Amino acid sequence: MKEKISFLKNKIDLNSPNKNIVPVTTSINNNGNLCIGECSIDDLVRKYDSPLYILDEITLRNSCRAYKKALKQYYPGQSLPIYASKANSSIFMSNLISSEGFGLDAVSEGELLTALKGGVPNEKIVFHGNNKSDKEIEFAIENKIKVIVDNDHDLKRLEEISDSFNYDIEIMIRFTPGIECHTHEYIRTGSFDSKFGFGIESLNNLFEVISKTKYLKLIGLHAHIGSQIFELDPHKDLGEIMVNVILQAKIFGHNIKELNVGGGLGIKYTQEDDPPSIDEWIKTVSLSVVQACKKHKLDLPILMCEPGRSIVSTAGVTIYKIGAFKEVPGIRTYLSVDGGMSDNPRPITYQSNYSACLVNNPLNSNSKNKYTVAGKHCESGDVLFKELELSNCKTGDLICVFGTGAYNNSMSSNYNRIPKPAAILVANGEAEIIQRRESPLDLLKYDVLPDRFIKQS
């Protein structure tokens, strides 16, 4: 019989997975080994090797359904949750979120193509980006995908390109609402000083310019105030700000029928993290918009939101195999693993923290030691954990790092010519490949030796 656990003795929240450290199906089997989706991680590594990305299907679907349920409960108008695919973009993820009734946001032709190949309806896709190329804009227009205009250059390119298509093109505009959030400065995108979106002071001029274009039809507004946010108060203010912008747009003849409040809800990476639940976040956002519309006697727009991390992070874990140990007497003991900054660049980039345990002794039942967990890359900063407490371990043991479903696979690289890991989906005791492991030969596919060098050799 399998023993159900909560990592670090936390109770698992089935309705709001972002408040858990572990996937909702996490358990320990009769052999004392960690399991996810009723699959033994030991067995998975024997079959698929390591490092290994694992996604838990039930956690993914629970997260999606929590958003849909809360929107239905708290927002009396139409709504559409949109998955921020930058968190983890793949044909599989596109297919899963589409099957749950979500739309998708993309910021490149690659993400757009992945969404379409995964079965996301084009009318449910929005195209973001602060420096879209003509080719990307043309791809979006040809596929009837809504473009979110980020700046004057965007607008100019869209207007010129739309003339050659000779039909109306629906657009939204992104603006910075000036709301500050207590988050890492590199992921704060809603303040006045941001590379994203129009300044709120320039909107009247923007509305006038759009009203004079031939084919551009402004139907929506977008604002996003940050990422990994644990506060609800900033979103209480956002509805009033956005509804006031709707009123401004009306003066210039624009009928705003879609309101996109962005995403940013945080997740629980460590014991110290305490994010709001999905229900609480949606309730705050919904009531903010409803109250502002009621105050100004406006019909409710279609409410959109763009969760990414809070859909996929907790559903994902990364498995590493322990290799070398190095003790620096009186200072620290280094424990090296077979991956690192190429499969998870967030610690070296953002100083991000995670939780982890051994696969063969997840409850840390014997003596505990603190290790600096180092990656295998040729960088001193390639450190995944500075002081990770683990029970006794040895070369060949497996470590499971939690909360890696977002911004690990999608930000991975081939630094040091290291192939990217495989990604698998687990559910009900079954495991399936969703992204194949790269081989060293794969890394040579796009290398070209100039003819004159070939002749010389």
Image (cartoon, rainbow, N blue to C red):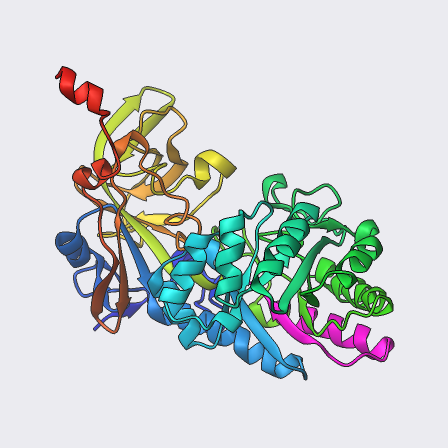
Q: Residue at x 14, y 19 (%)?
A: 455
Q: Where is residue 106 in the image (x, y as percent from the top left)?
A: 50, 57
Identify whether 246 is placed above or below 47.
below
Q: Position of residue 271 (x, y in %)?
A: 49, 52
Q: Residue at x 67, y 82 (%)?
A: 77
Is residue 294 inside the magenta stretch? yes
Res 19 visible? no
| Quarter-of-image position of residue 431 | bottom left
Q: Quadrant of the C terminus?
A: top left
Between 389 and 189, the residue placed more toward the observer is 189
Q: In which quarter of the image is the N terminus?
A: bottom left
Identify whether 397 is placed above or below 55.
above
Is residue 452 inside the magenta stretch? no
Between 274 and 233, the residue placed more toward the observer is 233
Q: Which residue is drawn at 16% across and 61% down?
A: 31
Judge from the rendering whether residue 434 lies leftward or rightward of residue 87; answer left or right.
Answer: left
Q: From which residue to which does the magenta span run?
A: 281-308
Q: Where is residue 257 in the image (x, y as percent from the top left)?
A: 70, 74
